[in-house]
Structures are given as C-alpha cells and as structure tokens.
Amino acid sequence: MKPFFILIFFSSLIAQEANSVKTDSSTSIDSTLFPEVIIEKNKAEKLTDENYFFDFKDNLQGLQIQIDSLKRVIRVMERKKAIPGINEELLNLIRIPELQHRVELTNGTVVIGEIIEESDLEIIIQTTLGQLSINKDKVVNIEEEKPPTPKIELMSEPFVSVYPDYEEITGMVKNSGKARADFVRIVAKLWTPETELAASDSAFASGSVQEYSTGVISDTAIEAGATANFTITVPLKEESATVEYRTYDIHWTESD
C-alpha cells in the first residue's frame, strides 16, 4: 500500500505545479517594455552595370594623365642623376681670366694669369691650369697684360667728295691690335659751325670674308695688322646748313 500512496502523492504535486504555471502564463505582459520591431518589406534597388555612381571613363583618363606626368618627372630626375657634378677644380680649369698678369720668376719661368689674392709673403694667381700660390721671394717682376684685342684706327683723314644732295666719304682703316675685328663699321657725322648735327650715315669696311659659327658669312672682318677700305654716302637735305667739319666713329665686335 505504501508505493501506491506515494505515487498518488507525486501525481497530486505535479498537477498543482501545472496549474500554477498555467496561471502565470495567463498573466498579461506589458508590451511597452520591448521596442517595436518593424519588418521592411521593400528591398533597395540594385544598381545595374550601366548606372555607376561616378564617371568611370573620366576617372580613368585622369589617372592615366597623372601616371604619364609622374613618368616624365621620374625620367627628368634620372637624367639629372646621370649628369656629373662640376667641382671647383674643373671650373677653375675652364675659367679664362679677363685681366692677365705676367709674372717672371727667379728660375726664368714666366706665369701668365690673373692675380686674385696678394699678401706680404705670397701671391695667388688664377691661370688656365688652375690656381697657383707663389712665394714673393721667387718673383722677379710682375706686369699687367690684357688679353689680345683688336684696335681699328683711321690710317689718314678720309677723302670727301661733295655733291648737291650728298657727300661721299672714302678712306682706309687698319687693325693695329692683336686679334681679329668683326663687322667693322665706320660712322660719319657732319656738323654745322654751331656744332649741330647736320647729317650722319655709316658703312661697313670691305674686309676679309669670314664664316661664323652661327652660319653667317660676311666680308667685314679685319685681321690683326690688316687694312680695309670703306665708302660712306651721306644724304644731304636741301635745307641742310653748311657743313663745317666731320667726325668719325669706328665700331666692331669680337667673335670666336
């Protein structure tokens, strides 16, 4: 009888627990304690292959331009790296002094260059081979010597032929310098008794033919020691005043 009684007792407890759970589940739940869940039924539209949110072609062209620009910059930088640097010694070798000095030493040696620094004990002279430091007790004599240059002069007073409406002036010039003169031009100026300019004109000398590095060929060069003729025609106006005297200017250039 005890087992049967225990079984009835447990059955009664299980029935009471079930009623208790059923009563609790029937209790109302406050819905405000939980957020409202919204289910979106409409899906976002998918972009097609033809509809880009940016200009695909223009962006590719811009990138290509930037890439080409960077390539050019890199090529320039590579070329700069390939160019060797010029040091001070090389610059001294190619630098030609304008004012030259002739320095005679005790052993008979003659040094020609530009004295760039001098003290009580030594002189520093710039030559085409570089800078030299020379003790003054080794120096016998120092003379200034300029580089060879041309010098054009009139050989005599030009001959003047006077006509009613012009003057013709002929003469000869000589290069008494030590270098060739190029594009030699003689300018004639006619003056009144009141020292007013009445007329002026110029002409090139009839010198030797010279071809220059620019491709220009001219016959107006005069070598050192050579002479050349010239003829200048100066037009005169009808109302021109009386010509009292004439002056002449000579112009030339030096070319390599």
Image (cartoon, rainbow, N blue to C red):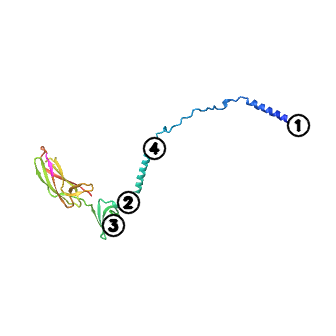
Distance from the alpha carbon under mark 1 to that under mark 3: 144 Å
Question: Crowdedness of circle 3 by 10 Å Cα count: few (<14), some, many (20+)?
Answer: some
Q: Is residue 200 above or below residue 103?
A: above
Say which quadrant the N terminus sits in: top right
Residue 233 visible to the viewer? yes
Residue 235 on the magenta segment:
yes
Measured as percent of width and height from the top left, residue 249 is found at 19, 53
Measured as percent of width and height from the top left, residue 207 is found at 19, 57
Q: Amino acid at mark 1?
A: Lys
The residue closer to the viewer here, 194 or 200, is 200
Please indicate whether residue 8 sits to the left or right of residue 177 in the image: right
Q: Which residue is mark 4?
A: 60
Question: Crowdedness of circle 4 by 10 Å Cα count: few (<14), some, many (20+)?
Answer: few
Eye-nearest disc, 3 or 2: 2
CB under 8 Å between discs 2 and 4: no
Please indicate whether residue 124 sits to the left or right of residue 5 in the image: left
The residue closer to the viewer here, 47 or 254, is 47
Q: Amino acid at mark 2?
A: Glu
The residue closer to the viewer here, 215 or 226, is 215
Q: Which residue is mark 2?
A: 88
Q: Amino acid at mark 4?
A: Leu
Q: Which residue is mark 1?
A: 2
Q: Which residues are magenta?
A: 232-236
Secondary structure at numbered mark 3: helix
